[in-house]
Structure formats: C-alpha cells, structure tokens
Image: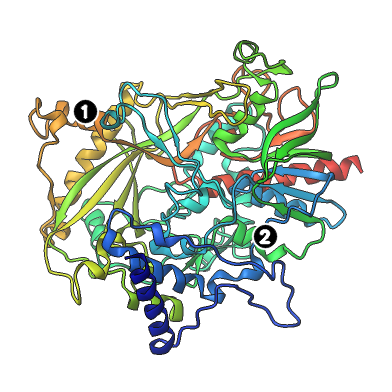
C-alpha cells in the first residue's frame, strides 16, 4: 500500500510538470548573481501533507499540494528565509531581542537601522512554513509543531464541553501568534488609548500613538486626502482589502446596512459598524510581520536572527538589579550565554514574557519563594490577564460554496495569485457593535466574525469528483466580547523552564461578560432575519445541543448554558506585564516599557497593554514595538 501511494504521488508530480508546466524544485534559491541571498541552501520542509488527517482520502491530494506549493520559488523566496546555523555562535551584542513574533520582529528591525548597534533576535521556534502565506491556508499551522498548543486550567463558566479546559494556540515560529492568525488590521477605539493616558501612562493617548500606527503602515487602498490623517503610506507593512469580494461578504454588509449600520474603515478611531476588512497582504499573499520588517534587511551585518533558541533565564546582577544578558538552549540542548552591552528587550508574548521574568526572580514574591526562586523584585508579573472570549452560532444558508480546494485552484494561485485559495471566504467581513451593556458614548464591546465559504479540507474536490452538489451550507457567526471585565493570571508551577505555567483566564467571572455575549446572540438573530440574508434562506440552526436540553431553546437560560459549554477564546491576549506608573501596584513596566526597579530590560509585546484594545491585536502590538524602539533609540542617543 505504501509503495502504491508513493508511485501514485510520483505519477501526479510528473503529470503536473508536464500538463501545467510546473517545475518541481524543492531546494529553493531565487536570486541572480548580483542579488544578495541570505540563505542559499534553504529547503522548504514538508508541511501541508498532514493538514487534513481527519479525511484519509485527501492524503495523496495534500501530499501533491504540499509539493506544488513548496516548489513555487517566488512564494517561498528561499533567499529571505532563516537557516539554523549552529556554528555561528555569538557571545555578545548591544541589544538582545527575545521572541521573533510581532513585537520582536519590529524592535529588531528598527534597532538594526543603526549600523553601529549589533542586534540579536532569539526565537524559540523554527522558520515559518510558506503555505500559511496563502490566504485560504492561514490557519493551517494551528495544532502543529508551530503552535505551543497551550491549554488553560479548568474553567468554571467556560469550555465545559472539554471539561472546562480551553485551547490556547500560541505561535512557536518566526512570526509568533501573528503568523497563525487571520491578519485583520484594526487599531481599536480612541477612548481605549485615552484611558491608558488617564491611568498615568504619559504620551500614550490616541493622538500620541497614532503616528506610531501610521509609520509602519503602507495602506494600499486608503490613499485619498480624507484618509491621510489616519493612514500611513510609507511603512513596511502593506495593508489592503482582498482583491476579490466573496459574494457572501457583500450580503453580510448589506444586512448590516439594512439594520442601520454604516460600512466602515476598521481602523477608524471610532469604528462602529460593518466592514470589508483590511488584511496585511500584498498581491493576494499574506505578509507576516517578519516578512515586512525583517526579511528585507537580512543583509544587515549588524542583525542576527537565531531560530530554535529557547531562552531559559535572564542574567541579572542582584546587587544593582541590572539585566546583562540571557541564557538559552539551542536545538541540540546545548546551553549558551549571550551578553547584552546595552539592553534586553523581552517580546516573548503574553505567556512567554511573564514566564521568563518569573523564572528569573522578577514576579510575585510569595509564588517565587514557594518554588525556591531567589526574588530579585516583587512585581505583579502574570496578573491582569485579559482575553477576548467568544461563542459561535451555526447558520444554515441556501448558498453553495463554489470555492473548492482543488489542483486547479492551487495551480491558478501559484501562476496568477488569484482564484479560490487567494481569499478567506466570509472572514473578509467583520463588525464592531455595541451590546445593551454599552451606550453610544462608549467603545463597541462586540465584534462579529463570519466563518465559512472558503476552500478547506471539507471543500476539497476529492470528496465530490468533478462538481460539488448544490445544497445547504453551514456558516458560523462568532460573537466576541472585546471589552471583558474578567481578568485572569499566568502562574509558575516549577522553576524548570520546560514546565509550562498555569493559565487561568477566569472567563466569564463577571455576569456582565455573559450579558455582552447574550446581546451578541440577539444581534446575530437580527442579522439573519434581514431581507438580505433571507434571500439566501438564512436560518439559525435550532437543534438544541444535548448539554442544554433541560432548557427551552432560544431562552436566556438556554443561551447561558450554550455559552458555558461552547466558549472559545480568540487569539487576542494581553495584560500580563501591565504598563502603569509606580503608584499602580499592579504595574510591571513604566510608560517607556522599562520594568519597574530593574535596569537593562524592557518589554515590547501585547503583555504590556493596561486595557486591551477592542479589536484584533496585531496592529496595536506593532505600535507598541515601534514605540519601544523609539524609546530605546532616544535613551542611547542621549547616553552617547
């Protein structure tokens, strides 16, 4: 059987080379003699062939799909990939950046703009697989080796379908969790940032942070004068609408208008309404943060990017409380020390940053002493965890999904960057709305996401032969509480850096958070009852879930039960290294992102957000990293 499959695969590859004129070359090098090539020997590893394991019939199809995608030299661009070089050892640098996710990529890029400063970025995971740059495959790395695959402590009011244990995907790859996410670009309401300012964080109001949003952005749509006040055009990060609007997206937007909501720019300072979302992409290819900020600058001799380097400890002088370097382990389990001549910038994320701080003696005194960790500074590290919580409703629609995952759609994308897999289906649309727990003077506390009508394992042509039968489609609408009151914590259970911390998001501890989701469910029902949606026969799936059969369907009691069992968390986490003034007993970093009472270190990632913005998290995290680089440049310019 194994030999038969191998022969089938070889035949299919030969067929594609002959029929579609596709060249299969797995050792990628896309350069000419005059072009700099950072990694001439890069080979894209297999990735997609195990993507659809729930569908054994797709094994051969996914194997060939994987080979075709890995053979696209322009998509892979092997000269701009990071190769793990164990021989290239470094003992010191001016700046050490821990974590190659959203924040770390930006900071390392900006600091290395000064050719006199040496910058080393250490990332625990491997290089990013190329396939996730294809819009329809954006979530393909979830649950794989590129995902830390964290889970929470059992929750009292959430995820009861899995005994209260909620999945927490976190990126373990260059690009971090941002590389695993849907790439929507939104910034949050101006009031959120003005409240940061009111809490004592100087120059963190909306007007203060706006230039740092704009400096990273290259908006390819909003280039008219009326948008120039809020959108940048000269930054490294391309932001744009998908080039093709899925028909179901237009229907969703029409439904919103029918209910009196406007079509909006998701990054409007007071965003409220429905939107054709903007995505971080160019030429129908996702642009992750390393692709925008790091890959164009791999020829900088003062910038070193090290993958598969797990930082286990901060090196701290306990006498003067100064961080002077890090200790890390490479993929052969060999331990190294790296000395920072100027600063360490911690960008390991909402879990990784507090985890490393506590392992190094910076955190809650009682918890550290209990584990035998010498206390360097008693700070509320790991507290104030915030997370956007959601629940999805299944909708039946009489609209066939014609966007199939096929050999033809793969070839069309590879040749022209068009076709079914160049888009994310209904996820193109989103909405910022207010619950009945909010008022017109407050930021929206609900975001809606629309899931379905995209090519995926369920819509692979192998299932259907030459055509897919016309029928009812399943379509989900997720309601997300984007201003939750409940907060949780990250706590150590061991001084061993390889033992994972306890994650307790404390979902739905406040009844207000339940009420926001209940309001969202009411809004979803209004949307599906609009004329626009009824043209497609939109209907809420009224099959009661067995866990809530004791309650009458569509009552508040039923939906409360449903929310408890079918809760989900978005990839929107923050707060575990909270920014605040010295007078804030819960603050970990000051308004220049320096850890209170500790020298030589800053935190530059989503963990510093004192109040989580009511939006997708990537754009605010980029802004934070831009500000961190600005603070660092000013500090060392003055010192010099």
Q: Is residue 572 left or right of residue 303?
A: left
Q: Is residue 301 left or right of residue 42?
A: right
In this view, 501 is above or below 116: above
Which residue is outermost to the left? Answer: 552
Which callout, 1 or 2, points to the residue nearer the camera? 2
In the rendered image, which quarter is residue 465 located in?
bottom left
Q: How many marks?
A: 2
In this view, 214 is above or below 392: below
Q: Which mark is residue 560?
A: 1
Q: CA distance from mark 1 to mark 2?
A: 49 Å
Residue 66 in percent (x, y) is at: 44, 67
Give the camera-side residue of 406 and 321. Answer: 406
Residue bearing the label numbered 2: 83
In this view, 555 is above or below 255: above
Residue 501 in sight in this render: yes
Q: Which mark is residue 324?
A: none
Could you tell which of marks 1 and 2 lies nearer the N-terminus? 2
Give the camera-side residue of 477 and 432. Answer: 477
Is the image coloured rainbow, by chain, by secondary structure, or in one colour? Answer: rainbow
Label 1, secondary structure: give it. Answer: helix
Q: Residue at x 36, y 21 (%)?
A: 509
Looking at the rendering, in which quadrant would you find the N terminus? bottom left
Q: Is residue 447 left or right of residue 101?
A: left
Residue 616 in percent (x, y) is at: 45, 46
Residue 533 in percent (x, y) is at: 16, 57
Crowding at mark 1 (Cα within 10 Å: few <14, some 14-19, many 20+): some
Q: Residue at x 56, y 62 (%)?
A: 228
Q: Residue at x 57, y 52 (%)?
A: 175
Give the camera-side residue of 306 and 431. Answer: 306
Crowding at mark 2 (Cα within 10 Å: few <14, some 14-19, many 20+): many
């Amino acid at each position: 059987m194994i030999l038969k499959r191998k022969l089938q695969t070889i035949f299919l590859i030969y067929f594609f080379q002959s029929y579609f004129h596709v060249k299969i070359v797995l050792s990628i090098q896309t350069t000419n003699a005059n072009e700099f090539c950072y990694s001439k020997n890069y080979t894209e590893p297999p990735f997609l062939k195990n993507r659809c394991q729930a569908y054994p019939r797709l094994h051969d199809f996914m194997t060939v799909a994987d080979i075709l995608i890995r053979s696209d030299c322009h998509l892979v661009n092997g000269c701009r990939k990071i190769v793990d070089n164990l021989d290239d050892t470094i003992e010191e640098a001016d700046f050490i950046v821990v974590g190659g996710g959203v924040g770390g990529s930006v900071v390392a890029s900006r600091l290395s703009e000064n050719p006199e400063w040496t910058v080393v970025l250490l990332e625990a995971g491997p290089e990013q697989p190329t396939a996730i740059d294809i819009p329809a495959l954006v979530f393909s790395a979830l649950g794989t080796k590129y995902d830390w695959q964290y889970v929470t402590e059992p929750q009292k009011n959430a995820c009861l379908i899995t005994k209260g244990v909620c999945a927490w995907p976190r990126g373990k790859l260059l690009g971090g969790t941002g590389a695993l996410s849907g790439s929507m670009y939104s910034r949050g309401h101006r009031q959120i940032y003005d409240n940061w300012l009111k809490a004592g964080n100087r120059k963190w109001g909306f007007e203060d942070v706006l230039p740092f949003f704009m400096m990273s952005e290259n908006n390819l749509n909003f280039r008219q004068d009326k948008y120039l006040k809020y959108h940048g055009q000269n930054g490294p990060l391309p932001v744009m609408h998908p080039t093709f609007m899925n028909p179901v997206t237009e229907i969703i937007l029409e439904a919103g208008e029918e209910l009196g909501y406007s079509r909006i720019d998701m990054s409007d300072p007071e965003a409220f309404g429905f939107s054709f979302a903007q995505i971080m992409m160019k030429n129908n290819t996702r642009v992750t943060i390393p692709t925008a900020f790091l890959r164009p600058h791999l020829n900088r001799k003062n910038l070193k990017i090290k993958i598969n380097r797990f930082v286990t400890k901060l090196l701290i002088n306990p006498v003067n409380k100064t961080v002077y370097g890090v200790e890390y382990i490479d993929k052969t389990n060999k331990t190294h020390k790296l000395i920072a001549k100027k600063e360490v910038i911690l960008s390991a994320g909402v879990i990784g940053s507090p985890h490393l701080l506590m392992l190094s003696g910076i955190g809650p005194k009682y918890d550290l002493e209990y584990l035998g960790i010498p206390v360097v500074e008693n700070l509320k590290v790991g507290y104030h965890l915030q997370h956007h919580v959601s629940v999805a409703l299944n909708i039946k629609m009489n609209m066939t999904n014609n966007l199939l995952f096929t050999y033809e759609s793969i070839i069309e994308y590879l040749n022209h960057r068009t076709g079914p897999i160049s888009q994310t289906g209904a996820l193109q649309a989103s909405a910022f709305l207010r619950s009945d727990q909010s008022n017109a003077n407050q930021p929206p506390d609900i975001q809606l996401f629309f899931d379905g009508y995209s090519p995926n394992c369920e819509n692979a042509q192998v299932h259907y032969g030459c055509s897919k039968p016309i029928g009812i489609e399943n379509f989900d609408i997720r309601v997300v509480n984007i201003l939750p009151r409940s907060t949780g914590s990250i706590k150590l259970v061991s001084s061993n850096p390889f033992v994972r911390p306890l994650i307790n998001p404390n979902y739905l501890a406040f009844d207000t958070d339940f009420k926001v989701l209940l309001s969202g469910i009411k809004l979803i029902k209004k949307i599906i009852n609009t004329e626009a949606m009824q043209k497609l026969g939109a209907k809420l799936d009224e099959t009661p879930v067995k866990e809530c059969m004791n309650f009458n369907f569509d009552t508040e009691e039923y939906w409360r039960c449903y929310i408890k069992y079918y809760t989900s968390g978005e990839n929107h986490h923050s707060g575990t290294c909270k920014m605040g003034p010295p007078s804030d007993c819960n603050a970990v970093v000051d308004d220049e992102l320096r850890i209170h009472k500790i020298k030589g270190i800053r935190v530059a990632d989503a963990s510093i957000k004192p109040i989580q913005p009511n939006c997708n998290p990537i754009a605010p995290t980029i802004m934070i990293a831009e500000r961190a680089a600005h603070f660092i440049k000013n500090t060392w310019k003055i010192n010099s």
